């Protein structure tokens, strides 16, 4: 047997061992990249969910300006926790629109009165159909949608204070 | 007290294992009285772990809830068989079974191996003790099966209901006998590298051990495949799941090893390669153990994940596999290369067999680890059956072709034209099958078509070595080879039929409706609640009629277990001569309708019948080899 060839199995095994060590050491990645990233928002027309605010249609999302679409519900506790972050994002000049999932007008009005209202429009998605079409499996979730109605970014779960700058930058970049 | 006794037995076993290593290491260096104690110590060590294992079984059968492992995995209302088998339906218990089998394998070598040169045998038992020590440490420090729980709960948490099946009683033990049995081949290779004693005598001594482990592995894989087929209710028999792959890889390496050991035993060739395969086969077992228990890959077989265990096992992998391969690199240069052979010869055929099996092994290994590799490179793509079926299927079909010709070749050198004449009948049959299937069967994919044709050819070619022989005087291991090769043909035919002719139907049926599937008319006759010891279920009554025949009754169930609360579907399968009718009861699908999933699977049973033939062939060969060892040998198959 050739001199070098006899060490080949050991070298191969060390490579394999390195791959296994990497697999063991790597932090578990919980980010799931949605197939909807880079795709257009589904077409939908949602009636107003709260009095005094318009409803939401997919056409408005494709009208030339980027938006942050927040899928939420008044019955959802993490949505209360993320309310200050949504307000900060809206205060920075980002148009924030909402899709209220399986909600009631009176409950939603109480929610907005108590936690502030960052939304320019809220559509009522009473059967979760638009939520599912967005590829969202729960509330809250936030989507950065560019001026052409293309989904650029998805955040699963509530926005944390440290996410705010990133979301504002992503909306600016989507112009 | 019983748990403490078990733990004490385990510690004593570990101590004797250390003594076995120490004594063997001294004795290998030269004459020493310690040589005399190695064999008895190996036997005593095995007796102690076996005692620990028996005590754990006792704790499970008695449902001693003051033991943490029992409280987590047992349930007092379970039938006896499942309380018994629950012992290894969890990480710690199955690891103890692993170590027990390792000890028993070493003890078997110590008691029965009389052919191997003494120093090599001592080195082999030393190698077995090195492996044992690491896994004892793993049990005692990271997976103690005897840990107590204080205060004990009033009832256990129960066993995963998917495991509540007679399969659990047989599948893991047979599979482990195979996996861990391969440790003997590994230790033999270590022993031979240490003493530089590699030759036909070594191969002949090692071969029965490999054969024994390989038979169990074959049975374990075949039985596991059938278990998954009827238990999961998905209609499939092989899912390329990481853990299935983890059992397939040692099998592929062991199959290659069996064939290369034949070349070494008969013609004194392929010395380095045989040693390499002996190391690789058990290394694959250990890598499989690591993959299953570290949580590094997701799988239906996943155990409770603990990163500390993964790290521990990874260190053991580096020590054992890395150490063995380093020893191989350092010593193999001094192993004289064996005799040469011609390009057309039995040896060349067996080399081709080895290369192709290695290619398939590589394909499966890369596919299994692909999620890790892809993630390291920043892409998230999973690969599944399409990759495996193509990348492993093509070399497998080439392998089948070589397999048909191999046994018809002569040792050392053969004449190409004579060979052609010998394989001509099989080639004709394959071609005929190809034409018949193309003409008369519904159109099917290229791989299954080739599979069917080659299966027909191989079936004939594999019985060809019996041609014009006195069947009564044909050696048992020749019969073994014939049956094992025939088994491959039978399995291949089953796989090809299942993948191309299966019919599947998912319907939402009302009671009284009839569904046509394959040759059957299936009437949904009724739905009733039924109860078992620890479950309740909805049971459908299906009346299947074929032509004008009487009705067969099938009763698929949707079961709900109480501990832990889980829903499972129990399939109902009718086996006919030409296939299986496979039925699953699903959920309610609105107003009075129930989901029924029905399959007609022509000749699917051939897959497992082939597996059984392969195992029987192995058993015949083993009996033949062991008998032959007590008489002067005549060479060859």
Image (cartoon, rainbow, N blue to C red):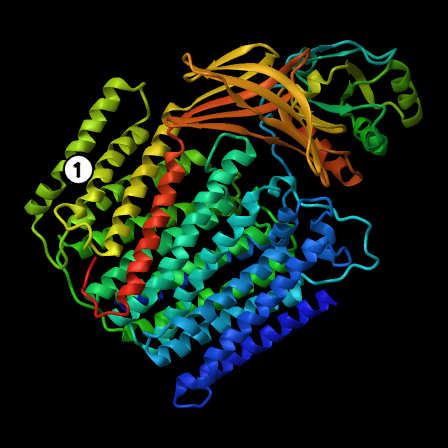
In which quadrant will I find the N terminus of chain B? bottom right
Splitting the image into 4 quarters, where does residue B30 fall?
A: bottom left
Q: Is residue B373 above or below residue B430?
A: below
Q: Is residue B207 above or below residue B60?
A: below
Splitting the image into 4 quarters, where does residue B194 fall?
A: bottom left
In this view of the protein, which residue sits in the foreground, A66 or B626? B626
According to the picture, the residue beneath numbered tag 1 turns out to be B426
Residue drawn at the location 36% of the way across and 36% of the way down? B390
Residue B137 at x, y percent in the picture: 60, 69
Does residue B168 appear anywhere in the picture?
yes
Count the numbered circles shown: 1
Mark 1, other Cα within 10 Å: few <14 / some 14–19 / many ≥20: many
Residue B278 at x, y percent in the picture: 37, 63
Q: Is residue A39 above or below residue B54?
A: above
Residue drawn at the location 59% of the way across and 47% of the way down? B302
Q: Is residue B15 above or below residue A105?
A: below
Does residue A173 appear anywhere in the picture?
no
Splitting the image into 4 quarters, where does residue B121 fall?
A: bottom left
Chain label for disc 1: B
User: Regarding mark 1 in the picture, which secondary structure is present there?
Assistant: helix
């Amino acid at each position: 047997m050739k001199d070098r060839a006899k060490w080949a199995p050991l070298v191969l095994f060390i490579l394999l061992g390195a791959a296994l060590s990497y697999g063991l050491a790597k932090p578990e990645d919980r980010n799931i990249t949605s197939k909807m990233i880079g795709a257009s928002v589904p077409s939908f027309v949602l009636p107003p969910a709260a009095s005094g605010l318009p409803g939401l249609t997919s056409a408005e999302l494709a009208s030339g300006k980027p938006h942050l679409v927040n899928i939420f519900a008044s019955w959802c506790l993490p949505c209360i926790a993320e309310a200050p972050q949504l307000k900060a994002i809206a205060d920075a000049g980002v148009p924030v629109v909402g899709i209220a999932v399986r909600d009631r007008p009176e409950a939603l009005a109480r929610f907005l009165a108590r936690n502030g209202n960052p939304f320019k429009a809220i559509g009522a998605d009473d059967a979760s159909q638009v939520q599912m079409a967005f590829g969202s499996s729960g509330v809250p979730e936030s989507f950065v949608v560019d001026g052409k109605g293309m989904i650029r970014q998805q955040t699963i779960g509530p926005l944390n204070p440290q996410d705010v700058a990133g979301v504002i930058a992503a909306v600016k970049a989507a112009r | 007290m019983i748990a403490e006794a078990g733990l004490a037995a385990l510690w004593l076993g570990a101590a004797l294992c250390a003594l076995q290593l120490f004594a063997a290491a001294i004795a290998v260096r030269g004459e020493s009285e310690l040589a005399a104690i190695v064999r008895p110590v190996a036997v005593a060590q095995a007796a102690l772990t076996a005692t620990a294992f028996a005590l754990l079984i006792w704790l499970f059968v008695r449902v001693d809830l003051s033991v943490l492992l029992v409280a987590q995995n047992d349930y007092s209302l379970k039938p006896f068989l499942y309380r018994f088998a629950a012992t290894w339906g969890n990480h710690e218990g199955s690891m103890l079974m692993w170590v027990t089998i390792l000890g028993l394998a070493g003890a078997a070598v110590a008691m029965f191996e009389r052919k191997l040169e003494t120093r090599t045998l001592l080195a082999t038992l030393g190698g077995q003790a090195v492996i044992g020590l690491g896994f004892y440490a793993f049990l005692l420090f990271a997976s103690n099966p005897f840990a107590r729980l204080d205060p004990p709960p009033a009832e256990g948490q129960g066993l995963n209901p998917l495991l509540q099946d007679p399969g659990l009683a047989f599948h893991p033990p047979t599979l482990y006998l195979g996996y861990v049995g391969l440790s003997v081949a590994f230790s033999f290779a270590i022993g031979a590298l240490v003493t530089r004693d590699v030759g036909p005598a070594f191969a002949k001594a090692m071969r029965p051990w490999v054969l024994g482990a390989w038979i169990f592995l074959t049975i374990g894989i075949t039985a596991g495949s059938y278990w998954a087929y009827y238990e999961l209710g998905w209609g499939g028999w092989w899912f390329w799941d990481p853990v299935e792959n983890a059992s397939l890889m040692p099998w592929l390496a062991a199959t290659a090893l069996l064939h290369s050991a034949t070349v070494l035993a008969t013609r004194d060739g392929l010395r380095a390669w045989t040693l390499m395969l002996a190391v690789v086969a058990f290394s694959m077992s250990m890598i499989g153990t690591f993959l299953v228990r570290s949580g590094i890959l997701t799988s239906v077989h996943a155990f409770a994940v603990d990163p500390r265990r993964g790290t521990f096992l990874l260190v053991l992998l580096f020590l054992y596999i890395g150490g063995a391969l380093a020893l191989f690199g350092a010593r193999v240069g001094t192993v004289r290369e064996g005799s040469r052979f011609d390009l057309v010869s039995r040896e060349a055929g067996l080399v081709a067999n080895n290369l192709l099996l290695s290619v398939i092994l590589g394909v499966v290994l890369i596919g299994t680890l692909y999620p890790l590799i892809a993630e390291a490179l920043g892409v998230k793509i999973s690969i599944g059956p399409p990759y495996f079926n193509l990348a492993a299927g093509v070399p497998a079909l080439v392998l089948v072709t070589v397999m048909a010709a191999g046994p018809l070749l002569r040792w050392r050198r053969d004449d190409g034209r004579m060979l052609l004449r010998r394989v001509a009948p099989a080639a004709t049959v394959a071609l005929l099958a190809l034409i018949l299937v193309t003409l008369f069967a519904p159109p099917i994919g290229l791989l299954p078509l080739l599979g069917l044709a080659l299966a027909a050819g191989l079936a004939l070619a594999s019985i060809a070595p019996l041609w014009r022989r006195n069947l009564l005087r044909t050696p048992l291991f020749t019969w073994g080879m014939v049956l094992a090769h025939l088994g491959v043909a039978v399995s291949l035919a089953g796989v090809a039929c299942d993948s191309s002719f299966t019919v599947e139907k998912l319907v939402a049926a009302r009671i009284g409706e009839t569904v046509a599937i394959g040759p059957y008319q299936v009437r949904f006759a009724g739905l009733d609640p039924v109860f078992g010891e620890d479950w309740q279920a909805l049971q459908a009554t299906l009346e299947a009629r074929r032509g004008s025949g009487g009705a067969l009754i099938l009763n698929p169930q949707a079961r709900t277990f109480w501990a832990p609360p889980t829903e499972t579907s129990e399939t109902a399968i009718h086996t006919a001569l030409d296939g299986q009718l496979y039925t699953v009861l699903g959920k309610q699908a609105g107003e009075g309708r129930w989901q029924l999933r029905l399959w007609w699977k022509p000749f699917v049973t051939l897959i497992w019948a082939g597996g059984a033939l392969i195992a029987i062939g192995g058993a015949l060969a083993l009996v033949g080899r062991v008998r032959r060892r007590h008489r002067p040998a005549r060479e060859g198959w």
